[in-house]
Image (cartoon, grey):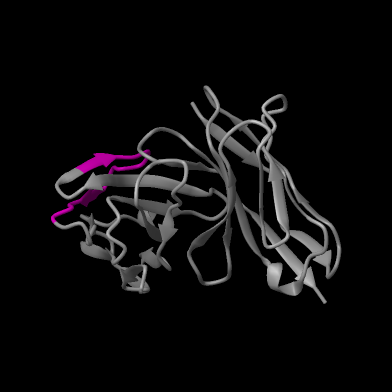
Amino acid sequence: GDSVTQMEGPVTLSEEAFLTINCTYTATGYPSLFWYVQYPGEGLQLLLKATKADDKGSNKGFEATYRKETTSFHLEKGSVQVSDSAVYFCALRRDSWGKLQFGAGTQVVVTP
Amino acid sequence: NAGVTQTPKFRILKIGQSMTLQCTQDMNHNYMYWYRQDPGMGLKLIYYSVGAGITDKGEVPNGYNVSRSTTEDFPLRLELAAPSQTSVYFCASSRTSGDSYEQYFGPGTRLTVT
């Protein structure tokens, strides 16, 4: 079945450092891919998405490129801020009913 | 515009008790979902609904029931609570399942069964 694998956390960084969170997936066909972010005590929010191979999603300085050759969708940000501290989830859309398959989540902690 | 609201925020249940988690959305979305989030495990889909009167099971439906009598409301019922149901529960909605439309999540209900 479909699955999403993310790098384990926590990832601890200093402010202004470069962030990469690896995400790979297993799925039939070419699913849509998403990154969601969960700030402490809140629900998940969509951060960015890509719907086909080679698409690049971007938002709030974050980027991720849909790579079908490596079945990956790694999240990157060039200069993180303390306010980026959160849990980040990679997900794929499983079917036409919109059901999502989530990775385990990666906690990111940014220190001043 | 409140989005997706969930009540209660926290609840402690004894083994064998029952309860209903409430979820309401004011965005006129057709699709609604219930997930549970266990530590280090990501989110697992419990049930989903594609419109009033239509529901279906997700990955982990055992021990839960849902109903969808209106577009706005999608309550999740726990019968005979068990410690394995200790989790954080999220409700989400989307306008359609198309790629262009995202799922909007509520703030969650933290449930402890002891």
Q: Nearest the camera: A30 or B37? A: A30
Q: Residue at x 70, y 32 (%)?
A: A67
Residue A45, relative to residue B34: is it above or below? below
Magenta residues, dominant SS class = loop
Q: Quadrant of the C terminus of chain A?
A: bottom right
Q: Position of residue A20 (x, y in %)?
A: 78, 50
Residue A8 visible within the image: no
Residue A13 visible within the image: yes
Residue B64, relative to residue B104: is it above or below? above
Q: Nearest the camera: A89 or B65? A: A89
Q: Position of residue B1 (x, y in %)?
A: 35, 74
Q: Which residues are magenta?
A: B55-69
Q: Residue at x 45, y 51 (%)?
A: B102
Q: Residue at x 27, y 59 (%)?
A: B28
Q: Residue at x 30, y 46 (%)?
A: B47
Residue B91, relative to residue A27: is it above or below? below
Q: Position of residue B34 (x, y in %)?
A: 34, 52
Q: Position of residue A60 (x, y in %)?
A: 68, 63
Q: Farthest residue toward the bottom?
A: A112
Q: Nearest the camera: A108 or A67? A: A67
Taking the magenta stretch, the answer to whether it contains residue B108 is no
Residue A52 picture quarter: top right
